[in-house]
Image (cartoon, coloured by chain):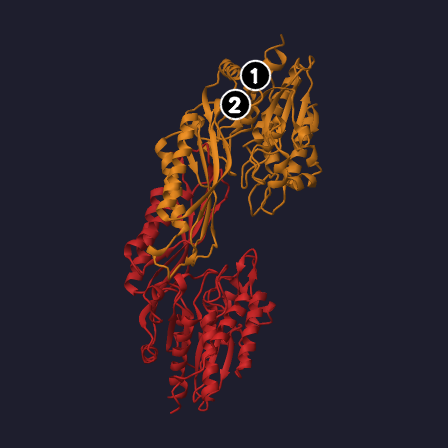
Chain colours: A orange, B red
Amino acid sequence: MAREPGALAIDAEEVQRRIEDLGEIGNDPEAGRWLALYSPAWEQGMALVRGWMEQAGLVTRVDAVGNLYGRLEGREGGDAILTGSHIDTVPNGGRYDGQLGVHAALAAVAALKRAHGQPRRTLEVTVICDEEGSRFISDYFGSRAIAGFATAAELETCRDRDGVTMAEGMRRVGLDPARLAEARRDDVAAWIELHIEQGGTLEAEGLDLGIVHTITGMREQRVRVLARQDHAGVTPMDARVDGMAAAADMIREALQIARRMGRPAVCTTGSIHAEPGDPSVVPGVVTFTQDMRDADAARYAELCQTIAQANQAAAERWGVRLEVETLNDHAPVAMDAALQAILQEEASRAGYRWKSMPSMAGHDAEIMAQRWPSAMLFVPSHEGRSHTPAEFTPIEQVIPGVRVLAAALFRLAYAS
Amino acid sequence: MAREPGALAIDAEEVQRRIEDLGEIGNDPEAGRWLALYSPAWEQGMALVRGWMEQAGLVTRVDAVGNLYGRLEGREGGDAILTGSHIDTVPNGGRYDGQLGVHAALAAVAALKRAHGQPRRTLEVTVICDEEGSRFISDYFGSRAIAGFATAAELETCRDRDGVTMAEGMRRVGLDPARLAEARRDDVAAWIELHIEQGGTLEAEGLDLGIVHTITGMREQRVRVLARQDHAGVTPMDARVDGMAAAADMIREALQIARRMGRPAVCTTGSIHAEPGDPSVVPGVVTFTQDMRDADAARYAELCQTIAQANQAAAERWGVRLEVETLNDHAPVAMDAALQAILQEEASRAGYRWKSMPSMAGHDAEIMAQRWPSAMLFVPSHEGRSHTPAEFTPIEQVIPGVRVLAAALFRLAYAS
């Protein structure tokens, strides 16, 4: 058995510098930061990480959809242990969500390689091309391609705000959409992802790490309220079929339902649009999104159903018609028990304070877990800020995550 | 004294044909109909009406901002009696709001000219270039330019959705923004405007005409809710500063306040936007409009004040900051008593069923009334539909308005 990794030299300054260097890419003085799939900024970010992988002596390759791997071949061959996260961001996003998992994986694997040389089993630092799906509304596309769940159809139907299809986006960065199926892997042993918690729990409770037991159930839907367009002055209040009145009631009621259910149930309306959109016209159509989550399967079902009933009741009260389009719907997903145990043991052995917790954000791990043993390790998020440029985790709170990740990878790839 | 106009020959078929011909202009298969100030469609519409004026033997001219006049010179000179309405529409608008007043004025003046020749006092059919202000958010710009209230500054600050200023828009249609002041008139005797009611009252009550006593007070404001952007999954409901939760409460409460006050109080939110606008991000900023109206000065003040207080109370409840921008604020405006009496007498004399009523829509008459005796005559709107392609008034319900308008113009320009 190889040496214990306790004394691993993790270069904290390098990790910090890389957070900043990658974080500089994709800044737009007007729109804020956005690293959108297949954008020039995304290409630039991917190239930067690939350079770091090569500096660390990893063998790099980009797959058919743009996922990036840095491979450290194991002596005994076999399936690869993948560790990493995603590089893309939401519009006006930060530089920790996803990207920190890439920095951590690279720092852990590079340190293991420096200290222990070639592993018995293969390790691959993995950079998922698209998790947020914020450009094409194509959530988890990168991991779905790896798991073999992505479809050729979506490359033609998913479009960005300018009408560009994913397939067109791929061609622009030199990828061939016809080769989608080649991104599928059947040689994976496990997936381990470090990520910021994105909530305020770890910080508030003074904990170093969270070890995820379940990834939340999550339903995202687009609700279209079909009402009657009228003049804002001459149609009396009692004679209106006002799309905005109905939508405001639905939005408010859904938020109250989540609030009444208590933690961790959440509901969010992040996007809304009225047509025709003139201040002096009662809107005939109002479209808004609802994002509903709970980590427990029964509570998740109850949350979604209660909100659907409330929407319908409001529609009847206001005399409007509803069209509800499901954007995505994922039941809660459990993480692998054996991998959770390894992370828990290594966190305890190193003396860190940790807890077992659900992830209320969706992650690539929920896709990977459908095919392979998967686990997630959380580090604190300052003030729980996430999906904003204010995302922040001090480097002293990053390093414990990198150490526990490295210790777990050591056990999986070197010691067993 | 000239002959009575009772037997005036109004060409109903021609009026109907012109409604349709002008209504064909500006159709867009995607965006619906929009006759926007200084757009190619607007230029086409203006040219069409100018041709009709010339066919009727009126002397035409376009003023410095694009208002169009067709003049029938009076024998005795003096100030001109103006009659007409506006040609521009809201996005996805109809072909009656504004445009019917142009058709009616032209039909009335042409019939008077055919039957009675030159009047004693000058008549001018007037086509206001921009009343809705839907392209540049420049409400009543045409009549404000005539009244001398438009400012050079707004030509540079008002921009359309593509960032084009009004001044640039003017130059594109061959107008010189530097000549704005030349549009001001000091030779007007009166303004009489026929318009569709835009509400359902006349139709529901089986009336032919409405004679306006007051134009509603109207406040349009843009409310910006400054909250905190967060992740839609990991920020518990009880830890959020959710801009959408606050906005939905404000919108709902304002609509309830108008409903509780009863007719004719109204409140509308026709436009809303969330930033960053991602379904999985709790919005940090939500911006929406509120349009509040009542025809009575005291009730109008109460409505606006109660809604302002409710917005503030909701902001405090949700811990958000508010920025409220006034887009426009017009107190109720009374129509000229003597002109109302003439319209009422002529409507009764012709045997039409009419009522005295407020206008709950803003009109150019409220601008003109600040300088000159002004009056408005309403014809029914089918099902009260307005600011929609579904606007409709059957020609049999248009002609009574044209007859009463002609009778009033006869009394003002020929008989006195």
Which chain contains the residue that carries disc 2?
A: A
- Residue B90 location, x and y as percent? 48, 61
Q: Residue A408 — which label?
A: 1
Q: Quadrant of residue A3?
A: top right
Residues at circles 1 and 2 in contact by the CB criterion of under 8 Å? yes
Image quarter (top left, top right, bottom left or bottom right) of the C terminus of chain A: top right
Q: Residue A64 — which label?
A: none
Q: Quadrant of residue A184?
A: top right
The residue singled out by tag 2 in the image is A377
Which residue is at the far top? Answer: A1
Q: Quadrant of residue B143?
A: bottom left
Disc 2 crowd, CA 10 A, few/some/many (<14, 14-19, 20+): many
Residue A40 appears in the rendering: yes
Q: Earlier in the sequence, mark 1 or mark 2?
A: 2
Image quarter (top left, top right, bottom left or bottom right) of the N terminus of chain A: top right
| SS category of the residue bearing label 2 | strand
Q: Nearer the viewer, residue A131 or B259?
A: B259
Q: Is residue B167 left or right of residue A302?
A: right
